[in-house]
Amino acid sequence: MKFIYPAIIHDDSDGFWAEFPDLEYTSSTGATLTELITNAQEAMELYILGALEDGQSLPTPTSVRNLPCTDSSYPTLVQTDIDLGKNSKSIKKTLTIPAWLNERALEKGVNFSQLLQEALVEKTL
């Protein structure tokens, strides 16, 4: 299940930090914007999973237009998919491939599980 909440990004001398006005006590930091957004997604996911596990209702996201920004801050939207973190237990899958392809992959040292996971993530996300 995907969720999108607004965040306010602050730029300071040490990097960046973000706060979620709708998600109480939820914030994140990062040396770069990419790191900040990745960390913000994780923080938001943890907040949402915790709230849902505790039976709490989630707040309605505030419009980005209504966020209180200053000269050194700006609004953004952060999206996360809680299904990605909820059930990450590995399961066994059996598949069939041609013998020649199996031999070639073994010669190259291919990790079949890792390759399949990467391909499935690319195809499904």
Image: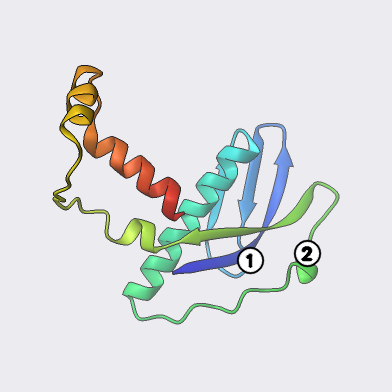
Q: Earlier in the sequence, mark 1 or mark 2?
A: 1
Residue 32 relative to residue 2: left or right: right
The residue lying at 66 percent from left, 35 percent from top is 15
Residue 62 pos. (x, y %): 68, 74
Q: Which amino acid does label 1 sit on?
A: Pro
Distance, label 1 to label 2, CA atoms, is: 9 Å
Structural crowding at the residue carrying mark 2, measured as other residues with C-alpha within 10 Å and reported as few (<14), some (14–19) or many (≥20): few
* Left or right for 67, reference 82: right
Mark 2, secondary structure of its residue: loop
Q: Disc 1 on helix, strand or loop?
A: loop
- Report the residue marked by disc 1: 21
User: Which residue sits at x=13%, y=49%?
Assistant: 94
Look at the image and tell me in which quarter the N terminus lies: bottom left
Q: Disc number at residue 4?
A: none
Mark on residue 68? 2
Task: Indicate the position of residue 125 as horizontal and vertical percent values.
Answer: 46, 54
